[in-house]
Amino acid sequence: MSTPNVPLDARSDALSVAHESPAYRMALRLGFAHPVPTRLAMKMGLIALVTWVPLLVLSFVSGLAFGDRVDVPFLRDPSAYSRYLAALPLLVLAEVVVATALAVQSGYFIESGLVPEKDLPKYQSFKAEFVRLHDSWVAQGVILVISYMLVITMRTTLAYRPGSSSWERLGADSGGGITPAGWWCILVSLPILVFLLARWFWRACVWAWFLYRVSRLELELTPTHPDHAGGLGYLAWGQASFGVVLAAVSAVLSGSFAAEVLYSGASLNGLKYHLAVFVAIALAFLVAPLLVFSGRLAHCRFQSLLDFGMLAWRHDQAFDDKWIQTPGVHQEKILGCPDLSSLADMAVAFEHVQQMQVVPLDRTALLVLVAAAVGPMLPFLASTIPLTDILKDLAEFMV
């Protein structure tokens, strides 16, 4: 399949999907936008300085960082580590990983020739809408307000069990009030975490909408493409890039699971069902956007089976007429004859069509997502349960 004659500026424009937003330009002025390791580390350190360090200082000043004054002191709360020292840095890293992946993905639609020249204007309009929605200030403002409302509601009314005490909130015997560290968590740390997670949920939905609109175009699929997805197999790795975000969500949940085991008497045997449901929902959410191409892939496969079947029949009939039905005329020249090679090539091409998938999902990319969902669970759960026991229980659950 040949690459269409696309102007160079159009191709360059397609590769800048994630780098045209107001948020990116602001980060550029602050020196954070370029994916330089030192700057990335500075940004991770800054977000930890704002979210985790004040909680440590305020808890220490209040005498709640360690000891037995409360049931859950700050330095023994695994959720505090998982949220602000694991999940938040991963969400910062995702800004680079996912932005780069989506830029390459959107550009490859043009570079590969999947989008025909007649549909380029439509594609560029879809891309422009994606860029606008991806970092919409209005959407981010709404997400921020909802994040604050959710955190304040949950943390002031619903999040505390009667009789329990922690570095966030004292028990009834000590007045039951929210501590200074608890207020910092409610007003600063937790809203930042919820906002970043919700914003990534929004961006994933916007990317899914973009893929849906692209799937409505007359894409030039290649039925014999070795990726067995008509040339769309690379899209699975775009979804796999969201594995960084998925790992952040998993880290948050793993800290909560570890806290449940430490302080609420929960067991891995009960929590494994929560883990299984989480993995299933996460994979379904990230794989679902690829289903929008199933109709075109199924039609391409069906039509190609008919076309290649007819072509193979004609080719094989000609081969039979030449080499089988007229023995002795050509058989002395059969050794080294290219007709035999073309017969094998035709069989290989037809086999490629037969193996064509109706969902552009790569098995390795799927394993990356599974690892992102399960991996962060292991070290935090291992802090309360021996790792060998975790792996044994998970293995028994799988079989």
Image (cartoon, rainbow, N blue to C red):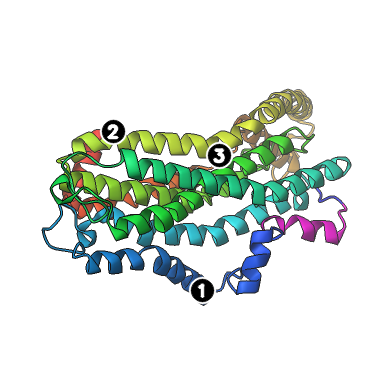
Residue count near mark 2 (Cα–Cα under 10 Å), binned few <14, some 14–19, many ≥20 = few
Report whether residue 48 is seen. Answer: yes
Quadrant where the image shows the C terminus: top left
Q: Position of residue 283 (x, y in %)?
A: 46, 38
- In the picture of the structure, the residue carrying the numbered disc 3 is 361
Q: CA distance from mark 1 to mark 2?
A: 38 Å
Judge whether residue 38 is colored magenta: no
As drawn, the residue found furthest toward the left would be 68
Q: Nearer the viewer, residue 140 or 162?
A: 162
Q: Position of residue 311 (x, y in %)?
A: 77, 28
Q: Position of residue 346 (x, y in %)?
A: 70, 35
Q: Secondary structure at mark 2?
A: helix
- In the picture of the structure, the residue carrying the numbered disc 1 is 37
Q: CA distance from mark 2 to mark 3?
A: 26 Å
- Residues shaded magenta: 5-18
- In the picture of the structure, the residue carrying the numbered disc 2 is 273
Residue at the image position 52 percent from the left and 49 percent from the top: 242
Residue count near mark 1 (Cα–Cα under 10 Å), binned few <14, some 14–19, many ≥20 = few
Q: Earlier in the sequence, mark 1 or mark 3?
A: 1
Q: Nearer the viewer, mark 2 or mark 3?
A: 2
Q: Earlier in the sequence, mark 2 or mark 3?
A: 2
